Image (cartoon, rainbow, N blue to C red):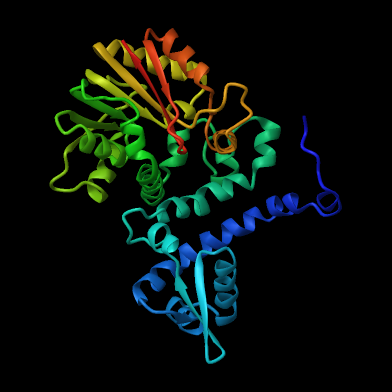
């Protein structure tokens, strides 16, 4: 039964106005991150005036004051008045998640959302009308070449790697511990990008060997910018669609299946099945829809993003299970983590 609206809600559409203005709130946070507001406030260790922040970040005082006041209004910054003048400081949330220096920083995710996803979503009307991604209209790149769009320059590749790192800062531990994977001694993260999730795997299962398998240009960039001397993971170049896939006990496909149409997904899963050791398996990591596709809202929004950026979509568990079964896998187990991403484990 539909929820009854109060007369107040009928007379004044509070929820609609909140939704209409949601993009403005996003842009406030994006702008503050791109300007370096949160980093400056964290480093200062004391409240700063709008004039001081504007001077350090080379902005207008008026514009910065308005930006800071909104950040206070949405409870990301704090403000105190001394001798009639406002002084701004970071909240714990801003220090933990929005400043670049924090171990839990989502700064790179925000930059990718602002500079790559936001322009794509400006063409959402055309994406819905045409039923295809908007890479050509937004970036002048072929709609069918997703890799070329995502990795169109080293700068864009680094932004994407930053996005992946931020995602696994939040969800990585929950994903790699959703099932006990200690029986798998060789694990390959296909399309593992910078290796962020692979590092979580290596920490959780130190007796297992963990390999990141990705395109040569991705591996080169990852090793240049993200690899550490004492790293416990190994990078290997290849193309899982067009080349050989190394033999392993467990293959991880994290945010890979949702990029492609079902035909390509089945081709990849069957190829993995053929390369997998007997008793081995595959771990899918995706934002799963409910079976009736009526939620979760974030997974629905991710699915719209797949429309505007890729050729894929998000699915409910039954659809992933069907593709895995068609590819030969069995003993399929589903784990909803309660975070943005969920896990499905299937065995050969």
Q: Where is residue 135 in the image (x, y as percent from the top left)?
A: 55, 40
- In the picture shown, does residue 257 fall above or below 78? above
Which residue is most to the bottom?
Answer: 83
Q: Where is residue 142 in the image (x, y as percent from the top left)?
A: 52, 35
Q: Image quadrant of residue 325?
A: top left
Residue at the location (32% across, 61% down)? 101
Q: How many marks?
A: 0
Q: Nearer the viewer, residue 135 or 296?
A: 296
Q: In this view, does 69 lie to the left or right of 56?
A: right
Q: Looking at the figure, which quarter contains the N terminus?
A: top right
Residue at the location (31% across, 31% down)? 177
Q: Image quadrant of residue 186?
A: top left
Q: Is residue 221 left or right of residue 146?
A: left
Q: Position of residue 128 (x, y in %)?
A: 68, 34
Residue at the location (39% across, 68% down)? 39
Q: Which of 95 and 99 is in front in this view?
A: 95
Q: Looking at the figure, which quarter contains the C terminus?
A: top left
- In the picture shown, does residue 29 fall above or below 303? below
Q: Where is residue 79 in the image (x, y as percent from the top left)?
A: 52, 76
């Amino acid at each position: 039964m539909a929820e009854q609206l109060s007369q107040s809600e009928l007379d004044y559409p509070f929820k609609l106005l909140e939704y209409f203005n949601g993009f403005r709130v996003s842009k406030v946070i994006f702008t503050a991150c791109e300007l370096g507001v949160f980093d400056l406030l964290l480093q200062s260790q004391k409240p700063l005036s709008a004039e001081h922040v504007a001077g350090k970040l080379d902005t207008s005082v008026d514009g910065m004051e308005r930006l800071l006041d909104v950040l206070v209004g949405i409870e990301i910054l704090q403000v105190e008045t001394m001798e009639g003048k406002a002084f701004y400081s970071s909240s714990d949330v801003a220090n933990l998640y929005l400043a670049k220096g924090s171990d839990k920083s989502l700064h790179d995710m925000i930059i990718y959302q602002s500079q790559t996803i936001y322009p794509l979503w400006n063409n959402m009307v055309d994406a819905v009308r045409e039923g295809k991604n908007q890479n050509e209209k937004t970036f002048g790149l072929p709609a069918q070449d997703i890799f070329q769009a995502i990795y169109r320059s080293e700068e864009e590749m680094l932004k994407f790697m930053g996005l992946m790192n931020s995602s696994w800062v939040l969800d990585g531990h929950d994903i790699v511990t959703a099932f006990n994977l200690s029986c798998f001694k060789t694990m390959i993260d296909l399309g593992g990008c910078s290796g962020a999730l692979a590092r979580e795997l290596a920490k959780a299962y130190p007796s297992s060997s963990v390999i990141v398998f990705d395109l040569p240009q991705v591996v080169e960039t990852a090793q240049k910018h993200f690899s550490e001397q004492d790293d416990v993971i190994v990078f290997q170049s290849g193309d899982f669609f067009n080349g050989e896939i190394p033999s392993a006990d467990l293959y991880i496909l994290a945010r890979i299946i949702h990029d492609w149409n079902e035909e390509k997904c089945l081709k990849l899963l069957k190829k993995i099945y053929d390369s997998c050791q007997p008793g081995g398996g595959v771990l899918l990591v995706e934002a799963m829809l409910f079976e009736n596709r009526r939620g979760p809202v974030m997974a629905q929004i991710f699915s719209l993003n797949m429309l505007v950026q890729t050729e894929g979509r998000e699915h409910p568990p039954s659809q992933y299970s069907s593709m895995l079964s068609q590819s030969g896998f069995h003993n399929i187990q589903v784990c909803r983590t309660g975070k943005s991403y969920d896990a499905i484990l299937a065995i050969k």
